[in-house]
Structures are given as C-alpha cells and as structure tokens.
Image (cartoon, rainbow, N blue to C red):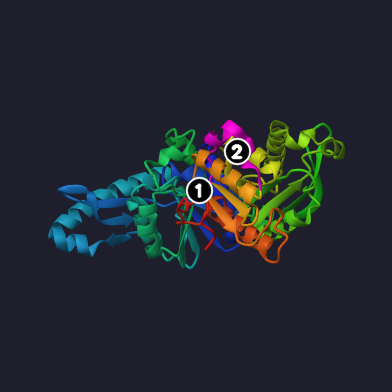
Amino acid sequence: MPFQDRRDAGRQLGRRMAPLAGRDAVVLGLPRGGVPVAAEVARALGAPLDVVLVRKLGLPRRPELAMGAVGEDGVVVLNEDVLDAAGVDEATLADVERRERAELERRARQLRGDRARLSLEGRTAVVVDDGIATGATARAACEVVRAHGAARVVLAVPVGSPRALADIAPTVDEVVCLESPQRFAAVGQAYADFRATDEEEVLALLRRPAPAPAAEVPTPRDEDVVADAGPDGLPGHLAVPEHAAGLVVFAHGTGSGRHSPRNRAVAEVLHCAGMATLLVDLLTPAEETARGPVFDVELLAGRLAAVARWATAEPSCAGLPLGYFGASTGAAAALVAAARDDAVRAVVSRGGRPDLAGPALAEVRAPTLLVVGGHDQQVLELNREAQARLRCTSRLAVVPGASHLFEEPGTLRAAAELARDWFATHLTGAALAGPPARRRADQPEE
C-alpha cells in the first residue's frame, strides 16, 4: 500500500508540495481524518495549521444531495441549480441553514476553544483531507475558503477518485494528488492503517506550536556517498535537486556503476524533471572481475534493497517516493527487489534482462517500463517474454535504431526521456494522470 498511515501520507504529500514553502500559505485540515495529514504538510511547508469547518446543506427529502454549504463567520455557498430544480423555498432553506450552522458553531467551539480562526485574506489556502471519494465535502471546503478571501486555493490529498478529482479541478487553482488509481474503491485502500482519528488527536495537533519556517526544508545535494550496505559499504553518487519529488536508485550489471556516462546522462534528465538519483556500485571491483556475482540476481537485489533503505533514511531523501532504474542484470535485480517491497512505486529497465527475475515477475506491483533498442533483437524477444509474465501496469517501448548500449546518436536521450515520463507519471505523480495503456511489445514510442 502507498501509505502506512495518515502521518506517512502527510509527509509524502508535504515533500510534493515543497515549492509552496515560504509563500504565505495556510494549511487547513478537514476534521477529523484530514488533520493528521494536514499537520505533516504544515510542518513541511513551515506554515500554520488550522481546520476548515463546513456543513453541507442537504435537500430536506434527499439529504445526500447538497444544495449548498455553510462555513464559519456567516459564509454560505449555494448551489442555485439544485435549489431551482428542487423548488426549495426561502423558509425551507433558512431552516436547514440554521440547523447546520448551529452544529458547525458547536464543532468550532469544540475544536478551537477561544482561538480565533486564522485569516485567509490574500493568502494561499491549502485544503487537505486524507482522501477523496465523492469530493462533495472537499469541494464545499474549497468554496468556503475562497469566500473567506483566499487569493489561491490548493486542494491536496494523498489519494482520490479520478472522477471526483476531475470534477473538482475546475473549481480550484491547483489539485495535488499522489495516488489516483483507475480502479478506485475507497480512500482506505491506500492505507495500511486507516483507523479513525479521534477528537483528542485533532485537538493535540491544533494546539501544537507552529512549525519552523521553510528554512528546515532539506538543501540540495550533489556528492559522493558510501551507502551502508554490502560488506564494507557501497560507494555511490547522490544528487538531490531543490524540491525533489522522487528518488530513483540505479541498479546495474558489470561496468555500469556510478561512473557510467550512460547512467549519468539518464540521471541528468531525471534531475531536470525534479527527481533525486543515487548511482551506486552494487559490486566490488573484485566481484565484477569474478563474473559470477554479475549474474547473481539475488545478491544484487538484496544489496539494492539495502541501498534503498539507507537512501530513504537520509534527511535529504526522507519521504520521497522510491523508484528503480535498472540496466543489464540490474533490471532483474530491480524487479526482484520491487516484488518484495511495496514502497517501490515505479521501475524502468533500459536494455535489461528482466527475464532473469524469474518467478518474481508475477509478484511485481510497481508500474514497469521496459525500454529496448530496435536493433537489439535477442534482448527484445526476452523482454517480450518477460512482459507477458508481469501482472502489474507495464509497457514495452522500442527505441528505433538503437543497439544494446544505445550508442547511436539520440537513442540514449530517447531512452532517458521515456524513463523521465514514466517516473513523472508513476513516481512523482501527476495530479490527475492515470496509468498508460499497456502496449504491444513491438509498438514503438510515439
């Protein structure tokens, strides 16, 4: 599952929203479940935290259908189309509004006590919930904060229904959603722990001192490192651009480690798209010379997983969604490691040997892209066979004119851009993007 609990979801969402740090934002959680998520977003942005309280005005005979909503300080938002279609008279509307406003004021006293509502006038309001199924409450909340004077309204959720997100997008300035599965069933499907949030937790989070300013956001890195994995640690190169939105760890076969010009060229394309990269030598020089370890997929997969654990524990990478980029036997290692770890969000293989992953192919859940050169016929056939065994979202892209090493002009760049687009969709998460259709193995990139 993408998220352990609401706080984990909030940390991941906060990383994605780092560009808003220092821009006079106010983070507003929807009680109750949205508040733990919002608290982590507020911490990441160095922004104050509050709640946005709304009450739906349901039709008297169809309370599930909203004819409007009320917010604090007398704000009321009406759905004139529903009111006209249902023929609701002013007296009926006033009675429903009076009843819902009384409940809203009770909830405000309960959650805020004597604290005043934070002013939104001229500010960026970030409305946060733990997920969106129908979007009715979130939409009402966004309309209410707009009525409270927010200059910009951003709806931010860890997971949401594609249809609900598409419906709400035109009503706000920006939608940020990390997960939008096409087979959406319920918000809770994205969480390992989706226990109800109690009132005491909400109150404790709202009373917590305001987070430090955005100066605490990790600074970019571009340096040699030694990952705490392997017999004596594994040397690598870690590059974290400003406001990184994801982390890609490279897995390789022989002669294609942290100094590889091909890996570095791909990494540079990923950096420009806002992704951190870690190029690491999974084998020692002696192991590469022995040749046996080069084809030891279990050994490579174990070390790759250990490197990934080390990297995601680094402060500059904490909370970043994780992806693997594999070449040669490293592609098989990446798939085996991904099959054992739900935290891996996307895998890309360039000229790889995914067939060597064996039975693990059927266990991979991370969306997988297989990139092969059009002139690399033997490896292309092996990739076709491997894709047929995958059960996850997958695609096989053929780069015309490319041989096994992508040495022909423009072919490596084409492979890197395919990887960039795959990670942008499945790792960093375009707000409303769904998974791409599965292609035939022989269908080239458009």
Image quadrant in which you'd find residue 271: bottom right
Which residue is nearer to you in this view: 372 or 306? 372
The residue at which mark 2 appears reads as 338
Kindly report the distance in space between the C-alpha atoms of the residues bearing marks 2 and 1. 29 Å
Q: Do the residues under discs 2 and 1 have CB atoms within 8 angstroms? A: no
Q: Nearer the viewer, mark 2 or mark 1?
A: 2
Residue 445 visible to an observer of this rendering? yes
Q: Give the amino acid at mark 2.
A: Ala
Give the prevailing secondary structure in the magenta stretch: helix
Which residue is nearer to you in this view: 391 or 274? 391
Q: Dot 2 surroundings within 10 Å: few (below 14), some, or many (20 or more)?
A: many
Residue 86 — which label? none
Where is residue 176 shown, x and y percent of the image?
A: 49, 56
Q: Is residue 115 located in the magenta-colored stretch of the structure?
A: no
Question: Considering only order in the chain, which callout, 1 or 2, is on the residue closer to the N terminus?
Answer: 1
Instruction: Note whether 55 is above or below 83 in the view shown.
Output: above
Which residue is nearer to you in this view: 124 or 346? 346
The residue at which mark 1 appears reads as 38
Q: Give the amino acid at mark 1.
A: Ala
Q: Dot 1 surroundings within 10 Å: few (below 14), some, or many (20 or more)?
A: many
Tell me which segment is drawn in magenta.
352-367
Identified at 76% across, 37% down, the residue is 294
Residue 113 visible to an observer of this rendering? no
Q: Is residue 362 located in the magenta-colored stretch of the structure?
A: yes
Which residue is nearer to you in this view: 420 or 82? 420
Where is residue 51 shown, x and y percent of the image?
A: 44, 50
Left or right: 334 as drawn, with respect to 5: right
